[in-house]
């Protein structure tokens, strides 16, 4: 039995909560995947996975084995990375997770150039609004907004993101133009749904800061959907400028507040990697590529 493959399949099956999906990620048919893990359990003389028709669950022994297997695979990957880094030939599958809006509108359009530069790297891009556990789910790189405090991760700052208040020309034509943030709540507001905290849009003008609590005409957990609703004339949105620059250029959206009022809470954008002895060359070149691209954009949006 190929022990390394069995370990990787075991971890992949648990992460995907499916034998078929876990095997497919590694190019192994479901029947072969199930057979290899059964052989692994037979070798260990214990059940690792409790199977049911709807889900898979680690047994107590399985949870211990998963943690140890993860350490073994990380060590193997570190050894491979050390060799690849010395040969300067990045290769392999790169698993990336990112927020939906930045992933679809910003990162995905860059991937063609990246893979032309590094043809031996394949990309597995997962887009989600939730904050994924990149270690247990096996991601190589996660793109995150806002301040981070997890010291067990390797964090690289890519850029700063500022938000802009905007709406469709049609919406703004039907209402009085805003002259200050205090007037925002006289308008229909489209806000990101935050389960544990309310929405507060914060602006500054010189030394003056204005904080506006927003209840929202629309609450949504997708920035992309909020932008599309704004384009459709539903109301005001306060979203990262980097995600709406193209809509400003096309005329689908326009700033709704004078340029003297700016976002008071610019958010850093980070690339987050699992902490390991060697950063895989495929991860390193990807992060360097993103940093170069983000910092070459308009200084008004990112620096």
Image (tube, rainbow, N blue to C red):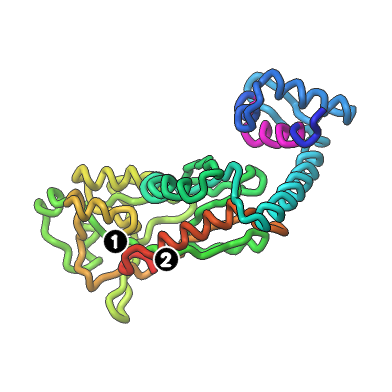
Q: Is residue 149 left or right of residue 58?
A: left
Could you tell me residue 246's position as x and y percent?
A: 26, 52
Quadrant showing the C terminus? bottom left
Q: Residue furthest front?
A: 87
Callout 2: few (<14), some (14-19), or many (20+) C-alpha neighbours within 10 Å? some
- Find the distance from the CA under tag 2 to the CA under tag 1: 13 Å
Please, what secondary structure does the residue beneath circle 2 have?
strand
Q: Give the numbered dot on residue 164.
A: 1
Q: Give the numbered dot on residue 84.
A: none
Q: Which residues are magenta?
A: 6-19
Could you tell me residue 47's position as x and y percent?
A: 82, 27
Question: Which residue is at the front of the view, 111 or 50?
Answer: 111
Residue 288 visible to an observer of this rendering: yes
Foreground tag (2 vs 1): 2
Instruction: Please determine whether, in this image, residue 256 is positioned above or below residue 32.
Output: below
Q: Residue at x 76, y 40 (%)?
A: 66
Quadrant showing the N terminus? top right
Q: Is residue 289 left or right of residue 249?
A: right
Name the magenta segment's main secondary structure: helix
Q: Residue furthest bottom?
A: 207
Question: Which residue is at the front of the view, 152 or 90?
Answer: 90
Q: Give the numbered dot on residue 160.
A: 2
Q: Tell me which corner region of the image, top left, top right, bottom left or bottom right, holds residue 88.
A: bottom right
Q: Tell me which corner region of the image, top left, top right, bottom left or bottom right, holds residue 11.
A: top right
Question: Which residue is at the front of the view, 128 or 234?
Answer: 128
Q: Residue at x 61, y 27 (%)?
A: 24
């Amino acid at each position: 039995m190929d022990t390394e493959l069995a370990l990787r399949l075991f971890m992949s099956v648990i992460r995907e909560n499916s034998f078929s999906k876990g095997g497919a990620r590694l190019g192994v048919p479901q029947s072969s995947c199930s057979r290899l893990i059964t052989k692994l359990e037979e070798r260990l003389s214990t059940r690792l996975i409790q199977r049911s028709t709807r889900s898979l669950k680690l047994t107590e022994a399985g949870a211990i084995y998963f943690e140890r297997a993860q350490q073994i695979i990380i060590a193997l990957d570190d050894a491979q990375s050390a060799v690849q880094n010395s040969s300067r030939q990045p290769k392999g599958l790169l698993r990336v997770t990112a927020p939906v809006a930045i992933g679809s509108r910003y990162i995905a359009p860059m991937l063609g150039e990246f893979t032309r530069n590094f043809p031996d790297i394949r990309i597995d891009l997962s887009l989600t609004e939730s904050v994924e556990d990149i270690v247990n789910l096996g991601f190589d790189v996660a793109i995150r907004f806002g301040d981070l405090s997890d010291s067990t991760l390797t964090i690289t700052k890519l850029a700063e993101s500022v938000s802009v208040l905007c709406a469709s020309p049609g919406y703004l034509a039907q209402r009085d133009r805003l002259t200050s943030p205090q007037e925002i709540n006289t308008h229909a507001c489209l806000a990101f749904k935050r389960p544990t905290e309310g929405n507060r849009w914060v602006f500054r003008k010189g030394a003056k800061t204005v904080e506006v609590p927003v209840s929202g005409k629309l609450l949504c957990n997708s920035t992309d959907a909020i932008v599309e609703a704004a384009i459709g004339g539903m109301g005001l949105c306060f979203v990262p400028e980097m995600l709406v620059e193209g809509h400003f250029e096309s005329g689908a959206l326009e700033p709704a507040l004078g340029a003297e009022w700016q976002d008071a809470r610019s958010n850093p954008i980070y690339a987050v990697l699992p902490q390991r002895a060697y950063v895989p060359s495929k991860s390193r070149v990807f992060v360097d590529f993103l940093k170069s691209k983000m910092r070459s954009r308009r200084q008004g949006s990112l620096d």
